């Protein structure tokens, strides 16, 4: 029985989740938060760093800010894509206004920018607002997402 490593987006603890239980409402063994629920969640820089290097599932991060018009336009599309891709990719959001150092740490020069992490490193990057279908196509670039 293969298990996946997933970092809890609430408490940052690493969880081992049997692959066949992924769609059955897997929860964090420490805090009980859902690990894969199809929501695009805002996370902290610490959780991002740990999940990007640890997660067995690809992690797609939307770097955004509340004052950014294109970011606000893309937000519902990113959420739609997260619901559609549940169990295949985890989708999270990083507010670059609240966490300015994180934007510079990841070399964000314009927002919205998405970075796809897999196998502990950056696999792909795309800037500009996109529709849900375009986001899902971008997320599929690793070849591990169907």
Image (cartoon, rainbow, N blue to C red):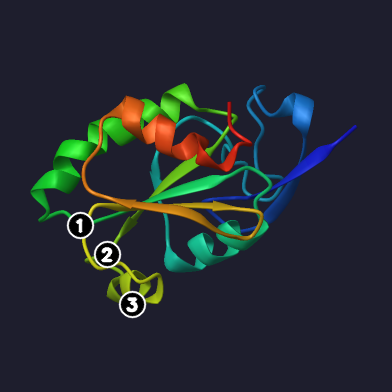
SS for dot 1: loop
- Image x and y of residue 22, in percent: 68, 29
Q: In this view, does 76 lie to the left or right of 25?
A: left
Residue nearer the viewer, 66 or 132: 132
Q: Crowding near pointer 1: few (<14 within 10 Å), some, many (20+)?
A: many
Q: Crowding near pointer 3: few (<14 within 10 Å), some, many (20+)?
A: few
Q: Which residue lies at the image location 47% right of the left edge and 38% below the top edge?
A: 139
The number of numbered discs placed on residues in the rendered structure image is: 3
Mark 2 vs 1, N-terminal side = 1
Mark identifier at residue 101: 3
SS for dot 2: loop
Mark 3 vs 2, N-terminal side = 2
Q: Which residue lies at the image location 41% right of the left edge and 38% below the top edge?
A: 138
CA separation, marks 1 and 3?
13 Å
Circle 1 is placed at which residue position? 65
CA separation, marks 3 and 2?
8 Å
- Image x and y of residue 65, in percent: 20, 57
Are the residues tagged 2 and 1 within 8 Å (C-beta)?
yes
Q: Crowding near pointer 2: few (<14 within 10 Å), some, many (20+)?
A: many
Circle 2 is placed at which residue position? 96
CA separation, marks 2 and 1?
6 Å
Q: Which residue lies at the image location 53% right of the left edge and 66% below the top edge?
A: 49
Q: In this view, does 130 lie to the left or right of 22?
A: left
- Image x and y of residue 131, in percent: 26, 30
């Amino acid at each position: 029985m293969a298990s996946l490593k997933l970092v809890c987006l609430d408490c940052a603890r690493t969880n081992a989740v049997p692959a066949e239980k992924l769609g059955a409402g897997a929860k964090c063994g420490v805090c009980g938060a859902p690990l894969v629920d199809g929501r695009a969640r805002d996370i902290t820089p610490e959780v991002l760093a740990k999940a990007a290097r640890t997660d067995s599932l690809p992690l797609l991060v939307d770097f955004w800010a509340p004052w950014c018009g294109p970011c606000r336009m893309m937000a519902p599309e990113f959420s739609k894509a997260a619901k559609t891709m549940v169990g295949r990719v985890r989708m999270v959001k990083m507010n670059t206004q609240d966490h300015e150092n994180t934007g510079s740490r990841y070399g964000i020069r314009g927002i919205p920018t998405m970075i796809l992490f897999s196998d502990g490193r950056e696999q792909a990057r795309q800037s500009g607002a996109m529709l849900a279908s375009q986001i899902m196509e971008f997320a599929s670039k690793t070849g591990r997402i169907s």
